[in-house]
Image (cartoon, rainbow, N blue to C red):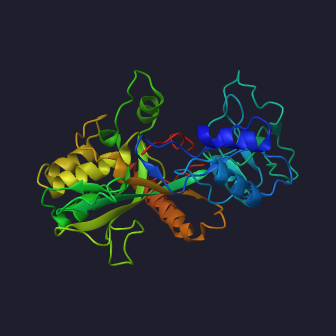
């Protein structure tokens, strides 16, 4: 984001901080990255986009600039615990178009004390009619408001690697069992502890390692193998004309968030099954008995592209992603139902789980 921030600062003639919806590893591409920044009121997004695209290097382009959604009231539970029942808070949150969080800031954290206020019971501006409940007005945030992401991993099987597309597509020279690959990808869909498919950080105590160890549970709502050419072909020139009997495929992912190098680990492990280097039972064991970094099959970075960041309120060019958000919500609901059944069938209301969805990396 540094390149974009420099261009914005130069164009707007003042320092601009750019906050992205996540980060990608070196060599990973992004066609649908999202960021936010503050600009003077009345800034013409179309003219700013045109100016930025003339200033940025050839491999970086701004697709659309628009005003972010309005701030929302966040419901904070009382400091020190207590307060109304979670079910009652959840019902009132829905009625007042608020967002609830399950944990309050620490007693010594007064970073937002000037914005937090007790509920006054009048039902306006997200106030809740419960004694001791606090609310906080939070602006829209490219990272913290993200509901999920769509990734695509492009592959070429057999034949000769195409030098025109090799920057965006990984080549697998071994014989690939397509049905086995589809089955392996299907086994990796769901809500699981994906520690086995996460790489630890390069330095001890790094952000990736801390995040994964803190909450390595993620939801992969879809991992679909698509034969390119059957649906109009790849958007990359040349890939629709494979040489030497090569076949082009892609894997489309929908997930809530990714651990460090998680998507590349998932593709690499599934390919290992499809090429006979890893048994299907061993793959399931990696999934069901998580151990940080246990998987040793990692797909190259160049085949992976961040296609879209998903939000509850889609942008103008993201209407088609509503289905992906609904898919994630259905997967999360199913996971909660399974957890409740495993715990004895008792009903519970989870107001929110803000843990682990921030600062992801594929």
Image location of residue 345, percent across then percent down: 42, 55
Image location of residue 52, percent across then percent down: 68, 51
Determine whether 80 is above or below 334 in the image. above
Image location of residue 149, percent across then percent down: 50, 55
Q: Quadrant of the N terminus?
A: top right
**How many marks do you count on the picture?**
0
116 or 244: nearer the viewer: 244
Query: What residue lies at 54% left-to-right and 63% top-to-bottom?
Result: 325
Q: Is residue 250 visible?
A: yes
25 or 52: nearer the viewer: 52
**Image quadrant assignment for residue 81:** top right
Image location of residue 270, percent across then percent down: 24, 54
Determine whether 32 is above or below 143 in the image. below
Query: What residue lies at 83% left-to-right and 37% top-to-bottom?
Result: 117
Determine whether 31 is above or below 11 in the image. below
131 or 50: nearer the viewer: 50
Q: Is residue 193 visible?
A: no
């Amino acid at each position: 984001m540094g390149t974009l921030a420099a261009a914005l600062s130069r164009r707007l003639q003042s320092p601009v901080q750019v906050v992205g919806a996540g980060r990608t590893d070196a060599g990973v591409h992004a066609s649908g990255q999202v960021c936010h920044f503050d600009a003077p009121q009345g800034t013409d997004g179309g003219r700013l986009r045109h100016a930025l695209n003339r200033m940025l290097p050839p491999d970086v382009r701004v697709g659309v600039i628009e005003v972010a959604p309005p701030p929302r009231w966040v419901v904070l539970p009382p400091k020190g615990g207590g307060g109304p029942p979670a079910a009652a808070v959840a019902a009132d949150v829905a009625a007042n178009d608020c967002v609830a969080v399950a944990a309050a800031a620490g007693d010594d954290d007064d970073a937002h004390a000037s914005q937090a206020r007790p509920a006054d019971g009048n039902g306006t501006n997200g106030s809740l009619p419960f004694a001791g409940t606090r609310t906080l007005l939070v602006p829209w945030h490219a990272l913290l408001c993200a509901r999920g992401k769509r990734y695509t991993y492009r592959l070429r099987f057999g034949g000769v690697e195409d030098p025109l597309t090799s920057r965006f597509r990984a080549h697998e020279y071994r014989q690939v069992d397509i049905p086995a690959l589809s089955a392996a990808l299907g086994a990796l869909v769901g809500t699981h502890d994906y520690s086995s498919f996460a790489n630890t950080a390069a330095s001890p105590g790094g952000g990736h390692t801390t995040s994964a160890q803190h909450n390595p549970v993620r939801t992969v709502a879809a991992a679909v193998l698509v034969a390119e050419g059957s649906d109009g072909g790849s958007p990359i020139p040349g890939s629709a004309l494979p040489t030497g009997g090569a076949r082009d495929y892609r894997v489309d992912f929908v997930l809530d968030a990714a651990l460090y190098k998680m998507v590349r680990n998932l593709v690499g492990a599934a390919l290992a099954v499809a090429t006979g280097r890893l048994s299907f039972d061993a793959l399931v064991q990696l999934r069901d008995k998580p151990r940080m970094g246990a998987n040793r099959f990692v797909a190259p970075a160049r085949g992976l592209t961040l296609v879209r960041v998903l939000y509850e309120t889609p942008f103008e060019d993201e209407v088609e992603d509503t289905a992906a958000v609904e898919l994630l919500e259905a997967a999360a609901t199913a996971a909660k139902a399974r957890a409740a059944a495993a715990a004895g069938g008792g009903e519970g209301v989870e107001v929110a789980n803000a843990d682990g969805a921030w600062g992801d990396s594929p």
